[in-house]
């Protein structure tokens, strides 16, 4: 899967499936399952590091996780988030940091939050042949502004302007997060590049979910998440059985021991 392949999926009417990944093992499994894209999201600050927001995540941490995922991916398009305050200061800063990410991780593209406000930065990245995905609607790095992660964005005019500005500046896709489905539908119809929804309804060109949420591992289940497994329950059951076997003297048994 290349950036042109990803973009072409829209004209072919093929829906894109994206999931987050933060480590080699998970990325390998998701890639083998046939996912189109793996997003190394700064959501790792919450689901991996246990923080309250994505704000503390550093560039070095994104590179560390991005390299593992890129090494695992044999098919999927790997996209790595630019974390908070690694692109907002200037376009020059964004180019330098995005270049580091592509160079040191082997990923295919970066993602940044913003539309109209980041149009010059997106254009600067595109001019340097650094493929970039924009992210409009609810932007987790703006949590201090919105007050909560679940704040639905309803300004139709601004959302459409943000998405169109991102496309015009050179973004090859746009993530739409927590916006009404009617607005997401309009944006999807008016853009020539793919839209990837998360909490934006069924009309986007593709969807993304945070993998630990999708697998029932994180315990986080907002309205827009569909759980396709119960790994939290499975891990708890397995760990409980292991503990009980040890306490009851059932493990290790003869077949687990060397003569």
Image (cartoon, rainbow, N blue to C red):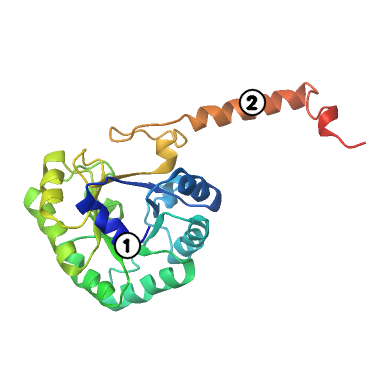
Is 259 left or right of 158, judged from the image as shown? right
In-front residue for pair 224/256 = 256
Measured from the top left, where is residue 237 in percent x and y? 59, 25
* Camera-nearest residue between 95 and 45: 95
Residue at horizontal 83 percent and vertical 30 percent from the top: 255
Q: In this view, does 97 lie to the left or right of 70?
A: left
User: Seen in the image, is 73 located left or right of residue 54?
Assistant: right
Q: Residues within 10 Å of mark 1 (few under 14, many from 20)?
A: some
**Could you say whether the residue bearing mark 1 is in a helix, strand or loop?**
helix
Number of labelled discs?
A: 2
At which x and y percent is residue 13?
22, 47
Quarter occupied by residue 6? bottom left
Q: Is residue 248 above or below residue 137?
A: above
Residue that protrudes farthest toward the front in the picture: 12
- For the point 22% across and 60% down, the residue is 114
Q: Is mark 2 on a helix, strand or loop?
A: helix
Q: Position of residue 9 (x, y in %)?
A: 26, 52
Q: Distance between the residues labelled 1 and 2?
A: 45 Å
Q: Can residue 90 be seen in this view?
A: no
> What residue would you read off at disc 2?
240
Q: Indicate the quadrant containing the N terminus: top left, top right, bottom left or bottom right.
A: bottom left
Question: Which quadrant does the C terminus fall into?
Answer: top right
Can you tell which mark lies on residue 48? none
Vertical placement of residue 236 versus 12, above or below: above
Q: Earlier in the sequence, mark 1 or mark 2?
A: 1
Residue at image position (21%, 72%) is 123
Q: Is residue 109 above or below residue 240?
A: below
Q: Residue 3 carries which label?
A: 1
* Residue 34 shown left or right of residue 151 in the figure: right
């Amino acid at each position: 899967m290349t950036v042109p392949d990803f973009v072409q999926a829209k004209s072919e009417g093929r829906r894109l499936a994206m999931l987050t990944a933060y480590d080699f093992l998970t990325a390998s499994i998701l890639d083998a399952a046939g996912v189109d894209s793996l997003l190394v999201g700064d959501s790792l600050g919450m689901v991996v590091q246990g923080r309250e927001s994505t704000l503390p995540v550093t560039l070095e941490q994104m590179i560390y996780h991005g390299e593992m995922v890129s090494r695992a991916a044999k098919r999927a398009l790997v996209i790595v988030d630019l974390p908070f305050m690694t692109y907002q200061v200037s376009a020059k800063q964004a180019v330098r940091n995005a270049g580091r990410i592509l160079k040191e991780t082997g990923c295919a593209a970066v993602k940044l939050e913003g539309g109209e406000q980041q149009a010059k930065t997106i254009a600067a990245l595109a001019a340097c042949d650094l493929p970039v995905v924009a992210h409009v609607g609810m932007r987790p790095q703006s949590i201090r502004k919105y007050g909560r992660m679940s704040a639905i964005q309803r300004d139709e005019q601004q959302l459409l302007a943000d998405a169109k500005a991102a496309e015009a500046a050179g973004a090859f896709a746009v993530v739409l997060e927590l916006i009404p489905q009617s607005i997401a539908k309009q944006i999807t119809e008016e853009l020539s590049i793919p839209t990837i929804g998360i909490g934006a309804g069924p009309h986007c060109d593709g969807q993304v979910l945070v993998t630990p949420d999708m697998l029932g591992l994180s315990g986080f289940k907002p309205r827009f998440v569909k759980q396709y497994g119960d790994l939290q329950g499975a891990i708890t059951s397995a760990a409980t059985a292991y503990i009980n076997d040890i306490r009851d003297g059932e493990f290790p048994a003869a077949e687990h021991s060397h003569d």
